[in-house]
Image (cartoon, helix red, strand yellow):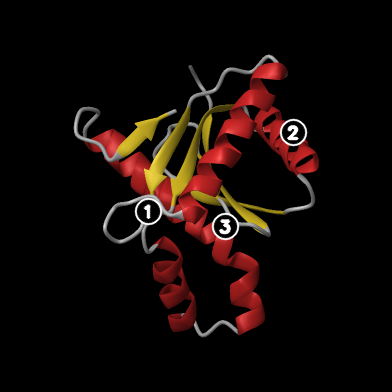
Amino acid sequence: MQGRILAIDYGEKILGLALSDLTGKIAQPAGRIVRDNLTSDLKNFLHLIKENEVKEIVVGLPKSLDGSLGEKAKETITFAEELKKFLSEQGLSLPIVFWDERLTTKEVEKVLLRADLSRKKRKGVRDQLAACLILQNYLGSVEKSSTDTDYTDF
């Protein structure tokens, strides 16, 4: 099935977004959703998914350093469940995959600091670049091997 892969860097206030190219090899930032309420957020996703012919969704799962699931990870899973349910109600059945995103935001922050961006500019791009890094790592893993991956189907 031809289409793009959408990555989400979940946050309480902002959802960072990235999309793959049609070949599924390159991740690119796709903006962010400033959270309003769940219904509005889900409608934004529906529009984005239809507009970009999304075939799969990757959600960054913020595991603790020891690999356990903390409160933030549980919130992320709950959000993904709501998204999957909403999409199903709209007649869309897309796979949602969780990808371990440990230290992704910190890595992005280091890159942005090296680029000497102001705090305000870093804040505006951090979430979507984190989603981009999540997606690129996922795409690289899928391309390398479909049998030895670090993701969980949902």
Image location of residue 64, percent across then percent down: 35, 58
Q: Residue at x 51, y 85 (%)?
A: 116
* Rendered image: mark on residue 47: 2
* Rendered image: mark on residue 128: 3
Image location of residue 75, percent across then percent down: 55, 48
Mark 3–mark 1 Cα distance, whole angstroms, equals: 19 Å
Hey, what amino acid is under mark 1? Lys
Hey, what amino acid is under mark 2? His
Q: Is residue 53 above or below residue 69?
A: above
User: Label 2: few (<14), some or many (≥20) within 10 Å?
Assistant: few
Q: Residue at x 59, y 75 (%)?
A: 122
Q: Earlier in the sequence, mark 3 or mark 1?
A: 1
Q: Is residue 106 above or below residue 19?
A: below
Q: Earlier in the sequence, mark 1 or mark 2?
A: 2
Mark 2–mark 3 Cα distance, whole angstroms, equals: 18 Å
Residue 115 versus residue 88: which sits nearer the camera?
Answer: 88
User: Label 3: few (<14), some or many (≥20) within 10 Å?
Assistant: many
User: Label 1: few (<14), some or many (≥20) within 10 Å?
Assistant: some
Q: Is residue 19 above or below residue 118?
A: above
Name the residue tied to disc 1: 63
Q: Secondary structure at mark 2?
A: helix
Image location of residue 84, percent across then percent down: 59, 27
Q: Secondary structure at mark 3?
A: helix
**Could you tell me which quadrant the C terminus lies in?**
top left
Image location of residue 53, percent across then percent down: 62, 27
Mark toward the viewer: 1 or 2: 1
Q: Is residue 5 left or right of residue 50?
A: left
Residue 41 versus residue 27: which sits nearer the camera?
Answer: 41
Q: Residue at x 46, y 65 (%)?
A: 105
Q: Earlier in the sequence, mark 2 or mark 3?
A: 2
